[in-house]
Amino acid sequence: MLDRADMTSRLVEIVGQVMPERSSLAGLASDADLYAAGLTSMAMVKLMLAVEVEFDISIPDADLHPDNFRSIEAVEALVGRLRSL
């Protein structure tokens, strides 16, 4: 089973891969606003797809809301909830 630290580490890596401005990620807190850090709508779609693949989940349409991808913490909560279903 994946622990929280591993999940956070994986999510940081994924976010780093999809963010257009990777340099803005240095020292980014897990609760920092990813949109303020440069996450675009296209990058959000890439993030969502990468999260589905990485954690072997399917994100329902009802959860495809920008708030669920606003921070690493928000994505963590979404993944945790979907994995427990």
Image: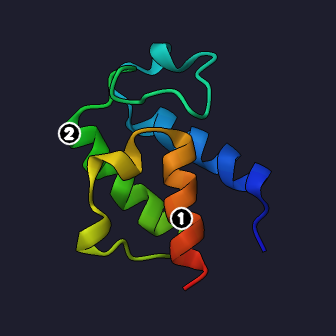
Amino acid type, residue under disc 2 in the picture: Ser
Q: Looking at the picture, how far across and down is residue 32, in whole percent?
A: 52, 27
According to the picture, the residue beneath numbered tag 2 turns out to be 41
Numbered badge on residue 79: 1
In this rendering, the answer to whether 67 lies above or below 19 is below
User: At 20% across and 41% down in the image, what residue appears?
Assistant: 42
Q: Is residue 70 above or below residue 36?
A: below
Classify 10 Å Cα crowding around label 1: few (below 14), some (14-19), many (20 and above). many
Q: Residue at x 48, y 13 (%)?
A: 23
Q: Position of residue 35 (x, y in %)?
A: 33, 28
Question: Tags 1 and 2 in contact by the CB under 8 Å rule?
Answer: no
* Quarter placement of the N terminus: bottom right
Q: Is residue 33 left or right of residue 38?
A: right
Comparing 21 with 7, the one in front is 7
Q: As drawn, is 49 to the left or to the right of 30?
A: left
Mark 1 element type:
helix
Display coloring: rainbow
| Most foreground residue, 65 or 56 | 65
Q: How many marks?
A: 2
Give the quarter of the figure containing the C terminus.
bottom right
In the image, what residue occupies the spot 40% across and 20% down?
A: 37
Per the image, label 2 sits on a secondary structure element best described as: helix
Q: Residue 43, position in %: x, y?
A: 29, 39
